[in-house]
Amino acid sequence: MNVIRFSDLCANGSVAGKRVFIRADLNVPQDDAGNITEDTRIRASVPAIQMALDAGAAVMVTSHLGRPTEGDFKPEDSLAPVAKRMGELLGREIPVVANWVDGVQVQPGQLVMLENCRVNKGEKKNSEDLARKLAALCDIFVHDAFGTAHRAEGTTYGIAQFAPVACAGPLLAAEIDAITKALANPKRPLAAIVAGSKVSTKLTILKSLSANVDQLIVGGGIANTFMLAAGLKIGKSLAEPDLLAEAKAVIDAMKARGAEVPIPTDVVVAKTFAADAPATVKKATEVADDDLILDIGPETAAKLAAQLKQAGTIVWNGPVGVFEFAAFENGTKVIAQAIAESSAFSIAGGGDTLAAIAKYGIEKQVGYISTGGGAFLEVLEGKTLPAFEILTKRAAA
């Protein structure tokens, strides 16, 4: 994927004295008092901002926060707490500028934060009038918010159409590189783990991956639907019986290519969905009518782990069991440890996946941890993200 990289512009001296507009993803969780409870996204946005300041640019950064109403700014929509935290990380005061669409005062070496961009009228629908005004604010637009790359909005797409230069920031460039390495030019065998409660929400992903991967490991409620499709009983477990034909089609598509969807040979069941419910390991052929499958069994987990250790590339989206409950976490834990120990290049994304990575402390053993939930899923579906599309177009112009 050919895009202009902000790091290259900084390295060749073409950023000094220029007005740089950075679209970051600073949409962080806050408590009822407005305090930031988790600042990963703010920390992840710092390299692009520091790069611009070091290159001698006049720097503007903005983001959305929460779900504000366009044209109706409320105090809780403010990026002020984000600016305060970012200021602590950068060791400087960061002024927050409101009503900035028609002009921003900022000098080379200075950094300002532009108030919540989703308050601007026309942002979500990517109005051309707004996009042209945004583009007029800068010499260089830097997209560094992968979490919004699947949305064609004013600050993610429109500005990139009309800014004199549109490029990818270091965070977005790293996502492009990791996705290309994992999906466009993977080292084989390529294994994908797709788990979650519903096949329907991941069906297009499963279909897209079934044409490309060597192993498609399914987990959670999705695995239950595939077990049904393979003729196994699943008791009262979560599943989507109306999607059995689609599940069979994925199994057949994989088989036709000499690849497979491994079906669990043993499972961990309980009679109720609760953290303290007694857990029982059963063969996949012995699930009772009143059983709930809440995890893959140890035999299945060991087989999958062995296969993952032989993989060349691993894509991971979703835990394979109810890993939040200690009695039903073994499958996810074993798979996480196998990914950590594998020499494969691994890319992981999705909120529950990141929670599992953090729980088992394998952050440093995963090749790349994606910062975007919806954007990561759309890439797995085989879609071209709007941000990638426009930046590629601008690089070719």
Image (spheres, rainbow, N blue to C red):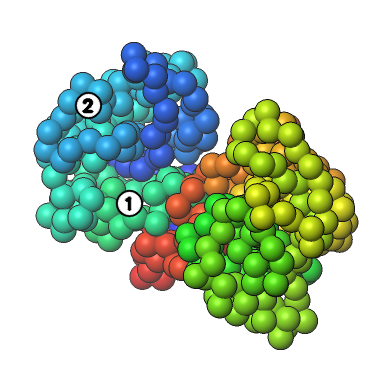
Label 2–label 1 contact, CB within 8 A = no
Q: Is residue 335 left or right of residue 77?
A: right
Report the amino acid beneath label 1.
Thr
Q: Position of residue 60 (x, y in %)?
A: 31, 35
In the rendered image, the vertical position of residue 243 relative to residue 9, given as above or below: below
Closer to the camera in the image, 361 or 294: 294
Q: Residue at x 67, y 81 (%)?
A: 252
Q: Position of residue 324 (x, y in %)?
A: 64, 34
Question: Element under label 2?
Answer: strand
Q: Is residue 262 left or right of residue 28?
A: right
Q: Residue under label 1, please give it.
A: 156
Closer to the camera in the image, 11 or 252: 252
- Give the numbered dot on residue 97: 2
Closer to the camera in the image, 336 or 396: 336
Distance of label 2 from label 1 (alpha carbons): 19 Å
Report the amino acid beneath label 2.
Val
Q: Residue at x 68, y 33 (%)?
A: 277
The mark nearer the N terminus, 2 or 1, is: 2
In the rendered image, the vertical position of residue 362 relative to residue 88, given as above or below: below
Q: Is residue 184 left or right of residue 381?
A: right
Q: Residue at x 57, y 72 (%)?
A: 244
Question: Element under label 1?
Answer: helix
Q: Residues within 10 Å of mark 2 (few under 14, many from 20)?
A: some
Residue 141 visible in the shown view:
yes
In the rendered image, the vertical position of residue 89 relative to residue 6, given as above or below: above
Q: Position of residue 276 (x, y in %)?
A: 68, 28
Quadrant of the rendered image containing residue 26: top left
